[in-house]
Image (cartoon, grey):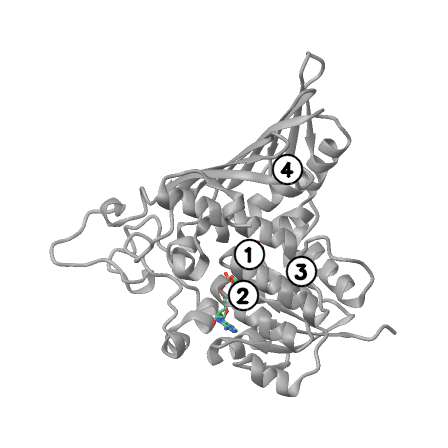
């Protein structure tokens, strides 16, 4: 019988529980030895929801004093990744950080140095690389079906106002901006699909155009203010964007948890004090001449990533939601649409694969291919896009890397 890996999850919110906790508790070769969250209510509720009884901690220091671990998974808000990963590596634990690596490239570089010094693996949770549709697309590119690729785009639609504008994700200080928080996923997909060419320069535009107080989707009644969060809002019945917390959610995000740290999960997405964008476009030019563009909107009910990859032999058009890849050859011939089978699991079967990979990496059975260096590259591209959109200029990657 293989020795069980002793793992801990740091940050027992949505992703810590619904992805990593849920998946790891089903792994026979893993023991979820500990859960750690600065919010004592949430860490206790997480163990109850997952129906496990690990040791519970509210600080990494306390956890380190008592536990011998093989690895930790960090699923805290992005602004905590640096400090949590630094502490974890200094304790000699292997680390998976769910994307992004950090909120800026400077922190990312320091994390890479510490991983080298501590001799541990620092791996990134770039789960989209395990998505079956994107894996098939990469195979088409690697097999030369598209010929020499020269242009690529991803139009991302995400029904994400509730996620991005109602809680910490709306804040630049907590994320380094959405081009890092959300965009680093997508910049990494471009880098990976294209074989990691060197990015040269980035430009972007982004703004809040819809999810603000001028665009509330209902008429205000005289003297009655909306919000501040959906559960107590007078306009609940009229608001098409309400985000009500279920009784299960309230175990994690209800009054008791809020009293401990002030973190409200469902602030009004129109009134929240956001300084991240609700839509934008970013472009990258690579050394080999490939140009990519990333369009993202968090407004509306559509959720999809629609890719177009242009090569000198064919064009590929992809929908992650429909699980389709259509290849149109350059000089006629059959236009073929492939429907890709998707296995069970979040993000098109990608999350279970990510977890399995981390376990194999910690066991030393394989090397991580989602490296901290890749995390740094994606974070740096996001940082460049943030600088570009805030300073209204094109940013050379040499300014950052
Ligand atoms: N790969 C993906 O597809 C994907 C999807 C969603 C989120 N994420 C990433 O996962 C991370 C978590 O996102 P989430 O939506 O689960 O957040 P969340 O707010 O639901 O949970 C974060 C938890 O971390 C806790 N926390 C805060 N500071 C901490 C600290 N210093 N030590 C320990 N715990 C701390 C909070 O109390 C909270 O319970 C983010 O970095 C996000 O970018 C990745």
Respond yes or no on whether mark 1 lies under 8 Å from ligand 1: yes
> Which residue is identified by label 2?
81
- Tell whether label 4 touches label 2 (CB within 8 Å): no
Viewer-nearest of discs 4 and 1: 1
Distance (Cα) linking label 2 and label 1: 8 Å
Q: Is residue 126 in view?
A: no
Q: What residue is shown at x 43% (from left), y 57% (from top)?
A: 169
> Which residue is identified by label 4?
323
Q: In the picture shown, does residue 277 fall above or below 26? A: above
Q: Earlier in the sequence, mark 1 or mark 3?
A: 1
> Which residue is identified by label 3?
123
Classify mark 2: residues with Cα within 10 Å, few (<14), some (14-19) or many (20+): many
Distance (Cα) linking label 3 and label 4: 27 Å
Distance (Cα) linking label 2 and label 3: 12 Å
- Quarter of the figure with residue 23: bottom right
Q: Earlier in the sequence, mark 3 or mark 4?
A: 3
- Tell whether label 1 touches label 2 (CB within 8 Å): yes
Q: What residue is shown at x 50% (from left), y 57% (from top)?
A: 104
- Tell whether label 1 touches label 4 (CB within 8 Å): no
Front in this rendered view, residue 247 or 378? 378
SS of the residue under disc 3:
strand
Front in this rendered view, residue 176 or 154? 176
Instruction: Name the spot of residue 177 as percent of width and height, x first.
Output: 43, 53
Instruction: Name the spot of residue 33 as percent of width and height, x first.
Output: 67, 78
């Amino acid at each position: 019988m293989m020795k069980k890996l002793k793992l801990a999850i740091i940050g027992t919110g949505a992703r810590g529980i619904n992805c990593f906790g849920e998946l790891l508790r089903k792994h026979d070769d893993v023991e979820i030895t500990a859960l750690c969250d600065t919010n004592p209510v949430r860490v206790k509720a997480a163990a109850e929801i997952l129906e496990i009884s690990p040791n519970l901690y509210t600080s990494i220091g306390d956890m380190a004093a008592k536990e011998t671990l093989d690895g930790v998974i960090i699923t805290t808000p992005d602004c905590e990744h640096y400090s949590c990963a630094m502490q974890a590596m200094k304790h000699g634990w292997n680390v998976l950080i769910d994307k992004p690596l950090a909120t800026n490239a400077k922190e990312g570089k320091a994390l890479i140095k510490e991983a080298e010094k501590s001799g541990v693996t620092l791996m990134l949770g770039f789960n989209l690389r395990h998505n079956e549709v994107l894996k098939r697309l990469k195979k088409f590119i690697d097999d030369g079906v598209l010929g020499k690729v020269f242009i690529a785009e991803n139009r991302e639609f995400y029904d994400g106002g509730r996620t991005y504008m109602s809680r910490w994700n709306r804040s630049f200080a907590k994320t380094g901006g959405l081009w890092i928080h959300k965009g680093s996923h997508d910049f990494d997909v471009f880098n990976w699909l294209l074989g990691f060419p060197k990015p040269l320069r980035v430009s972007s535009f982004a703004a809040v155009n819809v999810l603000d107080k001028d665009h509330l989707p209902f008429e205000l009644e005289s003297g009655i203010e909306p919000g501040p969060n959906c559960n107590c809002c007078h306009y609940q019945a009229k608001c098409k964007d309400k985000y009500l917390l279920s009784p299960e959610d309230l175990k994690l995000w209800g009054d008791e948890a809020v009293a401990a740290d002030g973190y409200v999960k469902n602030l009004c997405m129109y009134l929240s004090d956001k300084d991240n964008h609700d839509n934008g476009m970013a472009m990258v030019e690579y050394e080999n001449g490939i140009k990519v563009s990333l369009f993202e909107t968090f407004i509306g009910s559509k959720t999809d990533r629609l890719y177009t990859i242009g090569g000198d032999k064919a064009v590929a058009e992809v929908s992650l939601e429909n699980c389709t890849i259509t290849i149109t050859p350059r000089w006629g011939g059959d236009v073929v649409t492939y429907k890709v089978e998707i296995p069970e699991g979040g993000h098109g079967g990608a999350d279970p694969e990510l977890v399995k990979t981390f376990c194999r990496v910690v066991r030393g059975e394989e090397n991580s291919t989602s490296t901290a260096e890749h995390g740094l590259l994606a974070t740096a591209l996001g940082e460049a896009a943030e600088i570009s959109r805030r300073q209204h200029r094109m940013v050379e990657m040499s300014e950052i890397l």
